[in-house]
Amino acid sequence: MRKLFVALLILSVMGGAFAQEWSVGSTVEVSGTIDLDAKTAYGQGYNYYWGQDSFGTVGINYANGAFSGGISLNTNNDPLVLSAAVDADNFKFAAETDFVGVMAGDIDSIRRLWGYSKMFNGLLHLEAAFNSADTNFWIASEVINSVFDKNEFASFNSVGGTGFASVDHNNYLLANFALDSLGAPLEVGFMLPSVFALPDPAGYDLADEVFGKMVIGAKLNMDPVGIALQYTPGKAKNGAIYLGATFGLGDLNIGAAFEGYLGDDFVGYAGAGVGYGAGDFNVDAGFALGFDPGDLLIGANVAVSYKIIPDTLCLGLDAGFKMKGDANDFYVMPSLWYNVKGTGIATGYYSNDTALVLRYRFAKDAENALDITFKWSL
């Protein structure tokens, strides 16, 4: 099985060797942090998910119709990465791997391997993933997660709040029926997780790991209203449910969600949020509650941004707090984002390929620091 995966990856990349369009791209990121409490500095920057060292990549990419592929050299993590993709109207496939690791038979070196096919005029969406993309199915609002599970907090980050079909580097089989092709603004489907037991099939129980943890979902897409519902038997003794809704009116968006775990003791989370974006000004705010046996979790956050110079300079401010029993936590984070090329700017690490980012971070008992990051991409 491992040799089959390796062969598929290599052949898919070699298939692009006769591509008609070639391009060269590169990315450089230099970053550092000044700890104002310890009065020290270190060469590791910060983004919304993790601190990472400075790095650089250079890659050669090629394309031929729906097919594309690439080879990249990196100064950190995996030094040589191969990628291949097919992006057609009703079919999509993506693969990415660390070449050295996969040639040594390390199945964990496959960084992405997934694909889907749409059939019957888009009515049926079938997807298989050995190592999935970062996406979510049958979801309306993730306000619970945005309030409680921010990395800027120093403590008790384990709420979830993204439903049960949120995937990133997961394996599963999925079927989704989009009934809008029949005139009904509804989609319904199911996900079977952990179908691929590799690389460690020992103790693998198909009934428990796949059918015992399956997710059933539905979503109503009736503009300006969206409503999503999910159920899984695998998160609690009597199952777990997610219910979310969104409403959009011009520049205003409102969202609400509930996530409940139906065990011997009920655990649940509920939240509501509002977002407003008009031209260069954007604001998002959320409030959420958590019900745990013996404890009440309360949290709120706000994120504001304003583009002083469109496509070039943006100011941001993020703040939030949460309380659980006698414990509490908070963060405040003003930031400045500048794109020297003037090709577009926004707050958010992954929103900018090129940017100079200055950010001050203060979080209870954890952070009092200024971080600087410079990103440049070609």
Image (tube, rainbow, N blue to C red):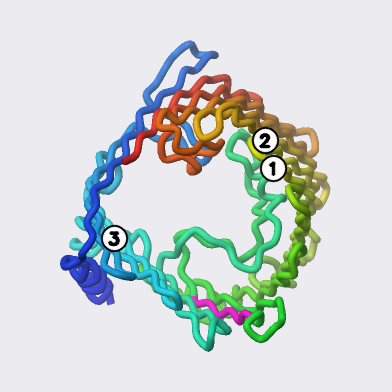
Q: Which residue is mark 1?
A: 277
Q: Viewed as shown, does residue 358 lie left or right of 271?
A: left
What's the residue at 80%, 47% (across, down)?
289
Percent across and percent down for residue 241 are 74, 67
How far apart are the alpha carbons under marks 2 and 3? 37 Å
* Magenta segment, prevailing SS (helix, strand or loop): strand
Picture quadrant where residue 340 is located: top left
* Circle 3 residues within 10 Å: few <14, some 14–19, many ≥20: many
Picture quadrant where residue 129 is located: bottom left
Q: Can you see residue 345?
A: yes
How many numbered circles are shown? 3
Q: Amino acid at mark 1?
A: Gly
Tell me the SS state at disc 2.
strand
Disc assigned to residue 83: 3
Percent across and percent down for residue 97 are 29, 59
* Circle 2 residues within 10 Å: few <14, some 14–19, many ≥20: some
